[in-house]
Image (tube, rainbow, N blue to C red):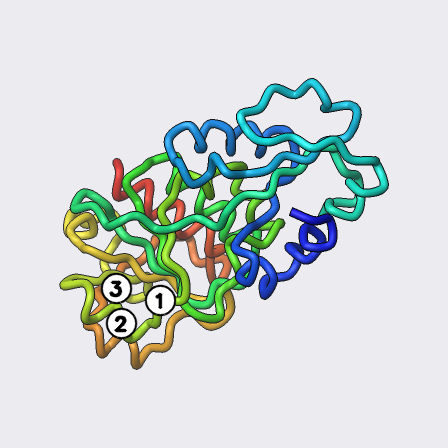
Amino acid sequence: MKLDDIKKLHQKKYRTELGHFLVEGEHLVLELEKAAAINPALKNSELYVTESFKDFPSRFNKHLVSEKHMAQMSDTKTPQGIVAVAPLLTASAQASVEKVVYLYEVQDPGNLGTILRTLAWFGNFRCLLSPGSVDPYNPKVVRSSMGAIFHVSMELDVPLESINNRFKSIATLDMDGKALSDTSFKNFDCYVFGNEARGVPREALQQMNAQPFTISGCGAIESLNLASAVNMCVYELMR
């Protein structure tokens, strides 16, 4: 890929148009290498390195670039000297053993990256993102996922109104719900979580008959961080 096109991958519209995203840093490139061993599509990734990484062992086509060009490719203030250009991931068919987490208009890249790390850690989870959510291929999401993005099947731009038709049983979080420790919490097909500030429209939750659960606290503060709430729910599902 030409340098000018690589630089465009910092923007969502060009990631979509060109069908690729950036993977920056040695750790993330190593995670990409592992994922490519089991995902044939990722084997077509291209690796760009500066002199300090010229001997980096890789299954990908490797290109040596100048520090100046690396700085133009990089999304960080201090480039590490190694960037891969990887094809956008394609969601696999949903497996019967998968639990589904649906995120409605999640905005914070760090939250999404952290959630993906948790889903990848436990495995057998699928992540659905609504329209208006942060792009999972945003470099900040990719970095905060620490490579988990390669191991979680994602579906993008899934309308909230489609969830009711797709899943028989849906759960969500609400201050007036049952305790998360209730045994019924593990029995749902889809778990819906809302925008960091606005949550999920209450009317939509009522229409889909979403069953409310709550994470009990001492009441000193109003709410939990979205990623923390999702992480606690996922842990409870796997406990």
Could you say which disc has been placed on residue 158 in the image? 1
- Asked whether the beta carbons under mark 1 and mark 2 sit within 8 Å of each other, the answer is yes
Q: Position of residue 130 (x, y in %)?
A: 40, 67
Rendered image quadrant of residue 46: top right
Front residue (pair 129, 221): 129
Separation of marks 1 and 3 at Cα, in angstroms:
21 Å
Task: Identify residue for label 3.
Answer: 212
Q: What count of labels does the image hold?
A: 3
Tell me the residue at 19%/48% (across/down). 186
Q: Amino acid at mark 2?
A: Ser
Residue at 33% over, 45% down: 234
Residue at 37% from the left image edge and 30% from the top image edge? 38
Relative to 31, 139 lies left or right: right
| Dot 1 amino acid type | Val
The location of residue 184, given as percent across then percent down, is 15, 52
Taking the spot 26% from the left edge, 38% from the top edge, the residue there is 238
Badge 2 marks a residue whose secondary structure is helix
**Above or below: residue 213 compared with residue 38:** below
> First in sequence: mark 3 or mark 2?
2
What residue type is disc 3 on?
Pro
Residue 162's disc is 2
